[in-house]
Image (cartoon, rainbow, N blue to C red):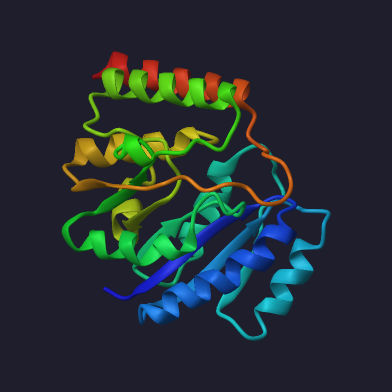
């Protein structure tokens, strides 16, 4: 198991991608992992497309365009379906997801179909780098999700994860939710299908440049709508 496609949605993340892509290359090359990175750009205005095209001259990086903003699910689907390797990693472009952790995620797939880098497994070392509002929303959301969907996980919505592409292909027609809720729907349907799901502890990183694009109110509505719908059906 040594070949991965890394899906990175991006919106005006040029300054972060300049650091992220070389660090991915170093981490994967040092671990003898064959890799490609697919940057799914939502019509950025900061020259992200030009940067990725330049990097692609020397590294296995591809630029995909997904012009519809506000729906990360479209970017993830676009990237996953374009991926050429059998194992997928999804991660953010802002460096909150540390590329040096990629080999550990991939290694954990030896005994799983999905591996989530959990921000909540190791509370002693955990550092939260976003606003208190984001932290409160995240904590409440995870607890409600675990209860309503009966998921044996501490961080089912976290986007830093690895999984087998064939599992996504089997479940993709069931995963129709927009936005970040796509991640929870994927875990929910995978769990119901009997897939092996693992979590490994992860220390959340910090955005270096730019601003967070997450609209908490909009994503909260999507999240509760899906969760309540799934709960009623269960």
> Which residue sits at x=77%, y=53%?
44
163 lies above or below 70: below
* Viewer-nearest residue: 121 or 54: 121
The picture places residue 109, in percent across and down from the top left corner, at 24, 60
> Which residue sits at x=75%, y=70%?
51
* Viewer-nearest residue: 54 or 68: 54
Image quarter of residue 193: top left
193 lies above or below 51: above
229 lies above or below 116: above
The picture places residue 72, in percent across and down from the top left corner, at 58, 43
- Quadrant placement of the C terminus: top left
- Residue 174 showing in the rendered view: no
* Viewer-nearest residue: 66 or 134: 134
The picture places residue 177, in percent across and down from the top left corner, at 48, 33
The picture places residue 37, in percent across and down from the top left corner, at 53, 69
188 lies above or below 218: below
- Residue 167 showing in the rendered view: yes
């Amino acid at each position: 198991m040594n070949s991965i496609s890394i899906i990175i949605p991006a919106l005006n993340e040029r300054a972060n991608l300049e650091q992220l892509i070389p660090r991915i290359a170093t981490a994967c090359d040092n671990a003898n992992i064959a890799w490609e990175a697919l940057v799914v750009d939502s019509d950025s205005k900061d020259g992200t497309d030009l940067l990725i095209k330049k990097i692609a001259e020397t590294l296995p990086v591809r630029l995909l365009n997904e012009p519809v903003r506000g729906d990360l699910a479209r970017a993830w689907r676009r990237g996953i379906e374009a991926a050429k390797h059998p194992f997928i990693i999804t991660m953010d472009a802002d460096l909150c997801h540390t590329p040096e952790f990629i080999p550990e995620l991939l290694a954990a797939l030896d005994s799983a179909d999905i591996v989530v880098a959990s921000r909540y497994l190791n509370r002693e070392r955990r550092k939260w780098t976003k606003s208190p509002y984001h932290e409160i929303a995240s904590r409440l959301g995870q607890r409600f999700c675990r209860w309503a969907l009966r998921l044996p996980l501490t961080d089912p919505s976290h986007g830093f994860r690895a999984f087998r592409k064939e599992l996504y292909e089997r479940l993709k027609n069931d995963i129709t939710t927009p936005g970040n809720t796509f991640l929870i729907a994927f875990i929910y349907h995978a769990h119901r299908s009997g897939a092996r799901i693992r979590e490994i502890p992860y220390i959340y990183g910090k955005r270096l440049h730019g601003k967070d694009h997450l609209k908490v109110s909009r994503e909260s509505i999507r999240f509760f709508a899906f969760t309540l719908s799934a709960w009623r059906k269960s």
